[in-house]
Image (cartoon, rainbow, N blue to C red):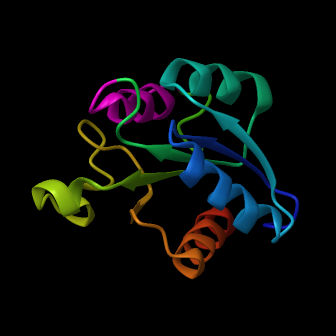
């Protein structure tokens, strides 16, 4: 399932995006990018990705939460896996593992702390794609 899967990265940090693209494309994933939450939602609807990698802090400090809720609350996309990226734990101490999966507050399937570790990113992406 994972080979040639379509992955949408929604992140406004060009360095993070480029490093993820290199890592994921080396594993034969098709990668597209959105720099804002609104662009990400348009691409979810237009490109039908197999997985979304979503940053928490986009246009505003928590725009990623809004995007995740919009995807998961839409019956057409509620089964689309979301891997959320965050540096929040480092900055605030908030532990996303306790909150991930909460349908109201944080409806994501998994999360990954920044800075990213390539092996962790690939294993989380593969695990989420294999659940579909």
**Residue 98's spot in the image, x, y percent?**
19, 63
Q: Is residue 110 visible?
A: yes
Is residue 112 rendered to the left or right of residue 25?
Answer: left
**Residue 35's spot in the image, x, y percent?**
57, 30
When the figure is inspected, residue 105 is found, relative to residue 35, above or below; the finding is below
Residue range in magenta is 60-74
| Residue 72 on the magenta span | yes
Can you tell which quarter of the image residue 125 is in?
Answer: bottom right
Residue occupying the point 60% across, 21% down: 39
**Residue 58's spot in the image, x, y percent?**
41, 31
**The N terminus appears in which quarter of the rendering?**
bottom right
Q: Considering the whole magenta stretch, tell me its main secondary structure.
A: helix
**Residue 50's spot in the image, x, y percent?**
71, 48
Is residue 106 rendered to the left or right of residue 58?
Answer: left
Residue occupying the point 59% across, 33% down: 77
When the figure is inspected, residue 32 is found, relative to residue 27, above or below; the finding is above
Can you tell which quarter of the image residue 127 is in?
Answer: bottom right
**The C terminus appears in which quarter of the rendering?**
bottom right
Residue occupying the point 31% across, 41% down: 103
Looking at this rendering, what residue extends furthest in the front direction? 15
Q: Is residue 81 visible?
A: no
Closest to the observer: 37 or 74? Answer: 37
Is residue 71 rendered to the left or right of residue 56?
Answer: right
Closest to the observer: 14 or 97? Answer: 14
When the figure is inspected, residue 9 is found, relative to residue 96, above or below; the finding is above
């Amino acid at each position: 399932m994972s080979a040639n899967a379509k992955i949408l990265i929604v992140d406004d940090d060009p360095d993070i995006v480029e490093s993820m693209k290199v890592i994921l494309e080396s594993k034969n994933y098709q990668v597209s990018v959105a720099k804002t939450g609104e662009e990400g939602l348009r691409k979810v609807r237009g490109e039908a990705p197999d997985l979304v990698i979503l940053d928490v802090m986009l246009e505003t400090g928590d725009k990623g939460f809004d995007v995740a809720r919009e995807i998961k609350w839409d019956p057409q996309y509620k089964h689309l896996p979301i891997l959320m990226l965050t540096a929040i734990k480092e900055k605030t101490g908030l532990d996303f593992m306790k909150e991930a999966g909460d349908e109201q507050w944080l409806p994501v399937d998994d999360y990954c702390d920044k800075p990213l570790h390539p092996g962790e990113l690939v294993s989380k992406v593969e695990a989420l794609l294999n659940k579909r």
